[in-house]
């Protein structure tokens, strides 16, 4: 899965980071329930545990808190359900906050004045 999500053609074709000047999605600006409350929101972030199958002698670190072997991957999507960010390769035992911190250091760009919706229990408030 790491190879599929992080390589051509998937990543270059389906993953596109949003920019500060991108227009407000119609799902927000045309709905009075969302506008103006979410006018600066550019998408949603969440981790996903993807099953993996490392050699038996490497099962300790990929084992997640639910007990199965996985990779912890961080994905972002826009309102039109397109991937805007994908960060893969962390062992299943890594916390969501640690994966987010690493993604932010390695290139997750959140434009000034914009934000992603995310699980408050998993991600820190603000940027690193």
Image (spheres, rainbow, N blue to C red):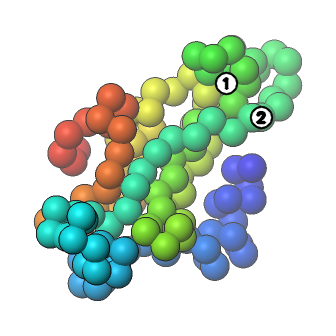
Q: Residue at x 32, y 67 (%)?
A: 42
When the figure is inspected, residue 93 is found, relative to residue 51, above or below; the finding is above
**Residue 30, image x, y percentages:** 28, 80
Graded by Cα atoms within 10 Å as few (under 14), some (14 to 19) or many (20 or more), the crowding at tag 1 reads many
Q: Residue at x 69, y 31 (%)?
A: 70
Q: Are marks 2 and 1 in contact (CB under 8 Å)?
A: yes
- Is 46 or 37 nearer to us in this picture? 37
- Is 104 or 125 nearer to us in this picture? 125
**Residue 41, image x, y percentages:** 26, 64
Query: Which quarter shows the C terminus?
Result: top left
User: To which quarter of the image does residue 101 belong?
Assistant: top left
Marking on residue 62: 1
Disc 2 to disc 1, C-alpha distance: 8 Å
- Is 102 or 13 nearer to us in this picture? 13
Can I make out residue 109 in this image?
yes
Can I make out residue 61 in this image?
no
- Is 114 or 25 nearer to us in this picture? 25
Residue furthest to the front: 32
When the figure is inspected, residue 20 is found, relative to residue 74, above or below; the finding is below
Q: To which residue does mark 2 refer? A: 52
**Residue 34, image x, y percentages:** 24, 65
Q: Residue at x 77, y 34 (%)?
A: 52
**Residue 5, image x, y percentages:** 67, 59
Secondary structure type for disc 2: loop
Secondary structure type for disc 1: loop
Graded by Cα atoms within 10 Å as few (under 14), some (14 to 19) or many (20 or more), the crowding at tag 2 reads some
User: To which quarter of the image does residue 9 belong?
Assistant: bottom right
62 left or right of 110 in image = right
């Amino acid at each position: 899965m790491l190879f599929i999500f992080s390589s051509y053609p998937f990543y270059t074709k389906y993953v596109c980071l949003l920019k500060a000047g991108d227009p407000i999605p119609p799902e927000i600006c045309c709905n009075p329930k969302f506008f103006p409350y979410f006018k600066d929101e550019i998408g949603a972030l969440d981790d996903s545990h993807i099953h993996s199958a490392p050699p038996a002698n490497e099962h300790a670190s990929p084992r997640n808190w639910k007990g199965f072997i996985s990779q912890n991957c961080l994905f972002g999507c826009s309102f039109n359900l397109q991937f805007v960010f994908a960060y893969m390769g962390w062992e299943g035992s890594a916390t969501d906050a640690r994966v987010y911190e690493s993604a932010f250091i390695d290139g997750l760009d959140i434009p000034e004045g914009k934000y992603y919706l995310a699980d408050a229990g998993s991600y820190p408030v603000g940027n690193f």
